[in-house]
Amino acid sequence: MSVSPAVQTNIKPPIWKVFLDNLIRLPWTWRITIGYLTFMLFIPVVAMFLKASTEPPAKFWEIATNELALATYNVTFVTSLGAALLNGVFGTLIAWVLVRYDFPFKRIIDATVDLPFALPTSVAGLTLATVYSDNGWLGSLLAPMGIKVSFTRLGVGVAMIFISLPFVVRTVQPVLQEMESEIEESAWSLGASQWQTFWKVIFPPLFPTILTGVALGFSRAVGEYGSTVIISSNTPFQDLIAPVLIFQRLEQYDYSGATVIGVVLLGISLVLLLAINFLQAWARRYDSR
């Protein structure tokens, strides 16, 4: 029996066919972008979640919330956030100096800021561990004051500060370059002090950019492995970070346990990044009023 044309028009094609039809109509730049993100980002993330979902919920919760895992979350996220916030202050100051002042060897110093990008993280960790050891150039000065850096949680923080600093500087620097100095001069002519000018004129439009740099630095610090594994003692409940714990689980052929901890790291990082993006959006709306 044949189906009438009226009935045929009510039959909806499958969702995947509609998606493919719309994908084919997109410009080639969109198709390449979607394909690249799918294979390099979406599929690996989905695969990790699917691997973690093979564990029963009770077992998943047990792995994710055992005492050792919670201790590594504390070291990883708290130290990363502290390093990112510290770089938010000093990275903005460095960007300000590089943009607003001319001085000898400025180009060399400006290029040096990008050194953590090019330097292998293992080399950075070895260098920092040597310099901040009790017999190192800086560690020998701190040791008499009872401050130990290498092979402690403080050393992990130093490594995270080192590798995440360029993200803040390079994010804030272009925005400062686009700011017109006439705005500051107008504020000064109206009787505003340098601090009032910075806090009420310069900082509000700069704040979302600083948050972006802090978010990028935080994300980089959370995933850091090469430098932190060398400068820390990797002692549980002291300075053991979550990426090192994942590697230890893999060495023990505990692939499910490593995946569970990885999923937890991914989930917490996404929540924090969404919160920072919300603050950025709020700051932009507040500044536009």
Image: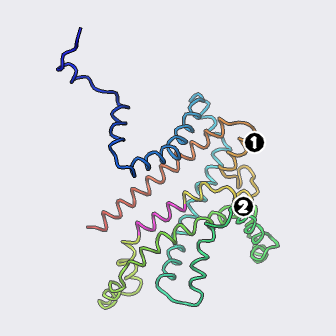
Q: Is residue 215 one of those drawn in magenta?
A: yes
Q: Residue at the location (38% across, 32% down)?
A: 16
Q: Which image quarter holds the C terminus?
A: bottom left
Q: Residues within 10 Å of mark 2 (few under 14, many from 20)?
A: some
Where residue 77 appears, x then y in whole percent?
58, 54
Q: Residue furthest left?
A: 6
Q: Which of 87 and 250 lies nearest the eye of the viewer?
A: 250
Where residue 225 appears, x then y in whole percent?
67, 55
Q: Is residue 223 one of those drawn in magenta?
A: no
Magenta residues span 207-217
The answer to the question of whether label 2 and label 1 lie on touching residues, with beta carbons closer than 8 A, is no
Q: Which element is circle 1 on?
A: helix
Seen in the picture, residue 134 relative to 9 is either above or below; the reply is below
Q: Quadrant of residue 185?
A: bottom left
Amino acid marked by disc 1: Glu
Amino acid marked by disc 2: Ser
Q: Quadrant of residue 218?
A: bottom right
Task: Give the labeled residue for mark 1.
Answer: 251
Q: Residue at the location (37% across, 36% down)?
A: 20
Q: Residues within 10 Å of mark 1 (few under 14, many from 20)?
A: few
Kindly report the secondary structure that dominates the magenta region of the rendered protein: helix
Where residue 36 appears, x then y in whole percent?
48, 48
Task: Give the labeled residue for mark 2.
Answer: 122
Q: Which element is circle 2 on?
A: helix
